[in-house]
Every structure is written in structure tokens, then in C-alpha cells.
Image: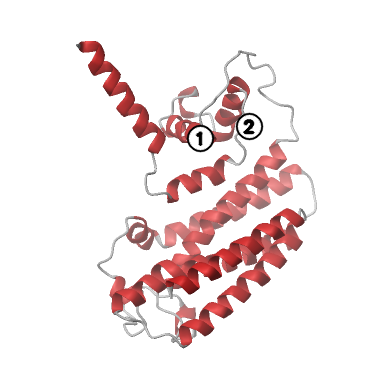
């Protein structure tokens, strides 16, 4: 099964990447990407209907970790399509209000499901047999109504919720990027940043990791500077284009060693301090 899923996911990623390259218009991008995601989900379901899981842990792994990668894309592009087709005509402030309302909707979903977020984010497993197997549908758990209407051969009580969490992470990036685009129509606040001859020569993700650490530590303007202001200042000072800082941060969160650069800095500094004591 893992080989099939790997090929299917690689094919879907390639198709989605091509669509992003070929389509700048957001509605068309969302529509085509949704079609490809639905096709991949259909293939996954057809395969799964004929597959017999080797063990309960095999079944849990599929519904907790595998299916969600495909389902989350379908949810994400469907929500993007809805947001873009229902976007109001109007000026900058109207659009900002629209995107902020959508972000607040994501926050309400988090508040409603905070306990499951905690369970999933901490990689807990003690309820996996209830959440991610088809035979153990426990109505005492908090369930969404659609669970009772879903195809029980291809669904568990919480596999859709995992996909929603993943989709909401992507939606947050998309919505914040749209707000950034609106802000970029304003004069550059940091146009007069000092023209020092220092260039950042490490990789971009390392600098973004450092920027987020400083941001969450409230190191600038008593914590009142937002992440984009800080990122733009670093770009001006260190002569670098950081690109999509939100998306990069999401990728940092999903890697095995989240604070790779900062941990490395700590080790290097500790080592040099010890050497200087000798």
C-alpha cells in the first residue's frame, strides 16, 4: 500500500505544481486543483476498498497519516474556491475585512476542537483505536454529524478532522498571503533602511526560523511589531528576498527537527565559550 500511496501522492504533487505554474488567476487555480485532488481521492478510495489491512496499527496509520494528505488538499482547494468566488468587490479595507473574517473562522474551528488539536499536535496515540479504526465508532466521543453519513468502509470518526487541521494550516497561509498582497500596495515602510554591506549567506529557512523566534520572544517594539514588519526589515538590512515567510514557517513546523538552525547556533556558541575558558 505504501508504494501505491507514494506514487499517487507524487503524481498529485506534480499535477498541482504544474497548475500553480500555469494559472495565476486564483479561481481557475483552485478549480483545477480541486479536480485533481478529487481524482486522487477517488483512486485512493478504489484501491482501499480492495485492500485488506494487515493489522490494526496498519489501519490506524492509513486513516491518521496517509488519507489526510489527500483529503486535506481537497478541503483546502474547495475552501479557496469558495473564498475566491464569494470575494466582495470593493476597496482594500473591504477585502481586508473579508480575509480577516475568514481567518477568524479558522480560529473558531480551533477553539471548538482545541482538545483534539492538543491530542493530534502532541502526537498522542492512546485514543487512536477509537479515532482511526472503522469498527470502533464511539458515539460518546464528540462527533460531527457528517460522520454518521460518511462511507463507513472508507472513514473513521476523526480522519476528516485531521484533514481539516492540515487544510486549515494551508488556508491560514493563503489568507495571510492575500493580506500581504494588499499591504504591498502601500509605500515601503523600510525604504530608508540603512544600506549596509551585509548579505545573508546562510539559507532562507534559517533566517526565517530566527525571525520567528525573535517575534515570539517579543524582541522588537515591546512585542508590537508584526511578523511581516520584522521580515521586511531583515530583507532590507541583509539584502535578501525571504519570499513566503508564512509557508516556510509551516514547513519548519512539519519537519522532524523544528529549530535546526537555532539549536545549531546554541551548540556552536556553547562550544566557543568553553574553548575561550581554557
Left or right relative to 174: residue 127: left
Label 2 neighbour load within 10 Å: few <14, some 14-19, many 20+: some
Q: Is residue 26 above or below residue 272?
A: below
Q: Is residue 32 visible?
A: yes
- From the viewer's side, name the closer residue of 275 and 178: 275
Instruction: Indicate which disc residue 158 carries.
Output: none
**Tag 2's secondary structure?**
loop
Distance, label 2 to label 1, CA atoms, is 11 Å
Which quadrant is home to the C terminus?
Answer: top left
Left or right relative to 206: residue 61: left
Q: Is residue 15 above or below residue 144?
A: above
Q: Is residue 245 above or below residue 162?
A: above
* Residue at left offset 47%, top offset 34%: 206
Q: Is residue 86 visible?
A: no
- From the viewer's side, name the closer residue of 38 and 46: 46
Residue 112, percent from left and from top = 43, 62
Residue bearing the label numbered 2: 241
- From the viewer's side, name the closer residue of 10 and 62: 10
Q: How is the image coloured?
A: secondary structure
| Picture quadrant where residue 86 is located | bottom right
Residue bearing the label numbered 1: 208
**Tag 1's secondary structure?**
helix
Label 1 neighbour load within 10 Å: few <14, some 14-19, many 20+: many
Q: Earlier in the sequence, mark 2 or mark 1?
A: 1
* Residue at left offset 69%, top offset 62%: 30
Total number of numbered labels? Answer: 2
Residue 87, percent from left and from top = 73, 57
* Residue at left offset 64%, top offset 67%: 78
Which quadrant is home to the N terminus?
Answer: bottom left
Amino acid at each position: 500500500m505504501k508504494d501505491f500511496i507514494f506514487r499517487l501522492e507524487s503524481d498529485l504533487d506534480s499535477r498541482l505544481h504544474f497548475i500553480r505554474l500555469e494559472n495565476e488567476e486564483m479561481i481557475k487555480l483552485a478549480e483545477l486543483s480541486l479536480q485533481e485532488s478529487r481524482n486522487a481521492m477517488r483512486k485512493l478510495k478504489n484501491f482501499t476498498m480492495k485492500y485488506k489491512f494487515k493489522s490494526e496499527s496498519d489501519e490506524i496509520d492509513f486513516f491518521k497519516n496517509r488519507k489526510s494528505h489527500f483529503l486535506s488538499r481537497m478541503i483546502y482547494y474547495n475552501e479557496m474556491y469558495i473564498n475566491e468566488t464569494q470575494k466582495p468587490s470593493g476597496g482594500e479595507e473591504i477585502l481586508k475585512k473579508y480575509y480577516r473574517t475568514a481567518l477568524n473562522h479558522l480560529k473558531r474551528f480551533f477553539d471548538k476542537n482545541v482538545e483534539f488539536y492538543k491530542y493530534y499536535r502532541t502526537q498522542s496515540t492512546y485514543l487512536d483505536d477509537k479515532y482511526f479504526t472503522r469498527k470502533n465508532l464511539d458515539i460518546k466521543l464528540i462527533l460531527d454529524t457528517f460522520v454518521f453519513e460518511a462511507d463507513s468502509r472508507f472513514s473513521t470518526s476523526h480522519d476528516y478532522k485531521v484533514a481539516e487541521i492540515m487544510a486549515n494550516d494551508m488556508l491560514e497561509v493563503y489568507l495571510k498571503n492575500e493580506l500581504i498582497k494588499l499591504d504591498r500596495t502601500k509605500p515601503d515602510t523600510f525604504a530608508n533602511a540603512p544600506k549596509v554591506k551585509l548579505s545573508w549567506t546562510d539559507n532562507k529557512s534559517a533566517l526565517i526560523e530566527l525571525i520567528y523566534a525573535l517575534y515570539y520572544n517579543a524582541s522588537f517594539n515591546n512585542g508590537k511589531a508584526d511578523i511581516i514588519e520584522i521580515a521586511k526589515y531583515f530583507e532590507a538590512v541583509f539584502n535578501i528576498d525571504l519570499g513566503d515567510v508564512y509557508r516556510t514557517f509551516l514547513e519548519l513546523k512539519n519537519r522532524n527537527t523544528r529549530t535546526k538552525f537555532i539549536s545549531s547556533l546554541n551548540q556552536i556558541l556553547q562550544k566557543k565559550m568553553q574553548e575561550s575558558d581554557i
